[in-house]
Amino acid sequence: MSASPILVVAGLRNSSVGRVAALLAQHEDALLLPELNLCMADSVGAWLLMAERSQDDIGHGLLRAVAVLQRGRESTTDIAHARDWLWRRSDRSSLSVLEELRQLVSPKRLVIPDLNLGWRPNYMHALSQFQAFQLLHLVRHPLTHCRDITHSLSQDYFVAPEWRDFCDNPSGVIDPQIAWYRIHRNLIDQFGADHARYQRLRLEDLLTALATQRDRLWSDLGWPAQSPSPSPAAVASGFLSPGCEAAVGGMEADVMHTPQLTQELRRDPPLDGLADWRPDGRRLSSEVRQLALKLGYNTQAQV
């Protein structure tokens, strides 16, 4: 039996990407992994150097995944073994490691969250060359997303230029709508026409009926029906908790703190609402509003 395609759940920070991946990985044929970020470098050696030089935990997810899949646990010793395992493959392509992990867990299918895929064309091109994948593009209303992530960014020690608007202020003001537009536009342009492998989901639709929407997604992805259907509250994976000191991360911190999605009524703000995270009180840019309309959001408030 051939190994199943991987499922990549791609979107923006503060969009519950990891939570949605965990929800879909409740399927009996699925296995949740943390963020691997393998598309960010061509070779395993280049990926290892990038991870070692990074000031964040961008490499923790892959180290944890390799440790667990190879040794069944993720102690400091296991993480060191995982790093050695990767260095022995340093001259191979990064996606060859993804294929090796895919074959290793067969017949289960891997479910992998990804917050970086849409940032760069070369990341998306790399994934498009990997034949055995499905992509779930997760979107969230631009106003609610930007308000939430502005609060998170304001607590960060460093805010990357990608989250700032430099048009009127040389130091830049935090304005996540630029990243919102960039990520979603990029993912649509690269994958949107690939109807066999691309699915798009609004987070707000999922939250109105978690179990129903999850089961529908399984069906849309071509996964076999599961009976009885598990409770959406029963998400469980070691990767949803911090790892050992050698590799703590791999998921967004807020996802590890609260891994479950909560069902809620849908309340979409109007797209002509104020961008109240900006000091100048502007509204959403016309480009963001137009893309949001294409994604199914309305100009009027929806309750």
Image (spheres, rainbow, N blue to C red):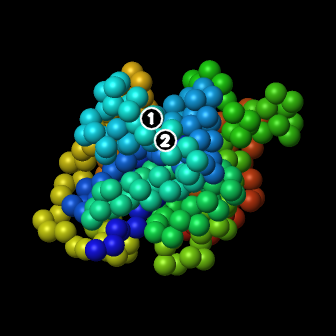
- Residue 25 found in image quarter: bottom left
Residue 216 placement (x, y as % from top left): 32, 71
Which amino acid lies under the numbered mark 1 shown in the image of this protein? Asp
Q: Which quadrant holds the N terminus?
A: bottom left
Disc 2 crowd rating (10 Å Cα; few below 14, some 14-19, many 20+) is few
- Measuring 59% from the left and 41% from the top, which residue is drawn there? 45
Q: Nearer the viewer, residue 279 or 303?
A: 279
Q: Is residue 2 left or right of residue 192?
A: left
- Measuring 40% from the left and 29% from the top, which residue is drawn there? 80
Which residue sits furthest left? 228
Check if mark 2's residue and mark 1's residue have beta carbons within 8 Å: yes
Residue 291 placement (x, y as % from top left): 66, 63
According to the picture, the residue beneath numbered tag 1 turns out to be: 84
Residue 224 placement (x, y as % from top left): 25, 74
Residue 247 placement (x, y as % from top left): 42, 29
Q: Nearer the viewer, residue 218 or 290?
A: 218
* Residue 224 to residue 153: above or below: below
Q: Is residue 120 left or right of residue 197?
A: right
Numbered tag placed on residue 88 in the rendering:
2
Q: Nearer the viewer, residue 116 or 77?
A: 77
- Measuring 68% from the left and 52% from the top, which residue is drawn there? 120
Disc 1 crowd rating (10 Å Cα; few below 14, some 14-19, many 20+) is few
* Residue 196 to residue 4: above or below: below
Numbered tag placed on residue 30 in the rendering:
none
Tell me the element at label 1: helix
- Residue 237 found in image quarter: top left
Tell me the element at label 2: loop
Is residue 272 visible in this depiction of the protein?
A: no
Which amino acid lies under the numbered mark 2 shown in the image of this protein? Arg
* Residue 236 to residue 73: above or below: below
